[in-house]
Image (cartoon, rainbow, N blue to C red):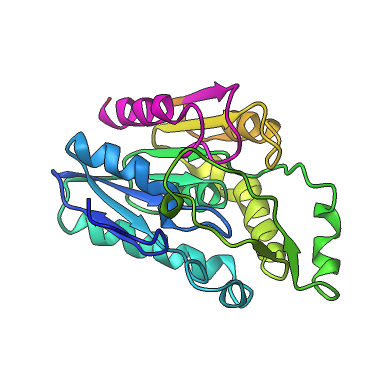
Amino acid sequence: MQSFSGNEEFFFQGGKQGVVLVHGYTGAPGEMRLLGEYLYQQGLTVLGVRLAGHGTTPQDLNETKWQDWYKAVSDGVYRLQAGCDRVSIVGLSMGGLLTIKAAAELPVAKAAILAAPIYVCDRRAPYLPLLRFFIRYLKKRQRQYQVPASYSVCYHMMPVKPLSSLFELVDLCKKKYLQSIKIPCLVMQSKVEHTVKPASAQYIYDHLGTADKKLVWYHHSGHILTLDNERDDVFQKIYEFLME
């Protein structure tokens, strides 16, 4: 693979089965790239999209809403459809919420939802819609991963203003999109992370409209499953799910 910064979209041309990979809030395509490289090595065509406001500056992200982020996902699905017989989608964290919407509305074959935030651990969450009038950014805790830095690039500050839009997307997933999904789904979640409550994954699994669904728990990983200790198992299980 050629050198990369982690901020840019990536595309690997493989076979006729395609997969769109969607990163999380304040993250970048790099956090999905190790998974993308693995799936490409197995013969898949892979597109790692860059969501609006990401991979540039926190100031850019502060001016976006979930509809802006979703456009990259929708565009990515239709882009792969042009050259693939089947397109699936994998989303991490906020990207998992976008994946839920895509699975409900777009022509995708399968969906893998990783650490999607129905319930968050941050006790400030109920107050964030009000905080945005007083605070523009919150400092993020940074976790170190045993990967090159370009895979784990992200913003070190969390813009507050778009979080109200993110929570709006959470509500839509709960009230509308989850029950509308009829395709096979894989839900993955760590039980020991400190960003998303494990109850999120159980809620997603229980409320999916499809009967063809799996829930996989991890016990030695943090929030970014694609970079953490059990990533090899995450990659293998996603590949097996896509190929079933």
Is residue 217 one of those drawn in magenta?
A: yes
Viewer-side residue, 130 vs 178: 130
Residue 12 location (% of width, % of height): 21, 52
Which residue occupies the foreground of this view, 36 or 114? 36
Query: Going by the image, does 127 lie left or right of 160?
Result: right
* Whether residue 139 is situated above or below residue 46 in the rendered picture: below
Picture quadrant of residue 126? bottom right
- Note whether residue 55 is visible: yes
- Tell me the residue at 70%/56% (across/down): 140
In the image, residue 230 lies in the stretch drawn in magenta:
yes
Q: In the rendered image, is residue 212 in sight? A: no
Question: In the picture shown, does residue 77 fall above or below 63?
Answer: above
| Range covered by the magenta-colored residues | 214-243
Q: Please give the count of numbered marks on the rendered protein.
A: 0
* Residue 139: image location, x then y, percent: 73, 60
On the image, the x and y values in percent for residue 153 come to 49, 56
Which one is in front, 228 or 211?
Answer: 228
Note whether 136 is above or below 21 in the view shown: below
Picture residue at 43% right of the left edge, 37% below the top? 112
In screen coordinates, is 238 left or right of 221? left
**Viewer-nearest residue: 243 or 237:** 237
Q: Could you tell me residue 242's position as x and y percent?
A: 30, 32
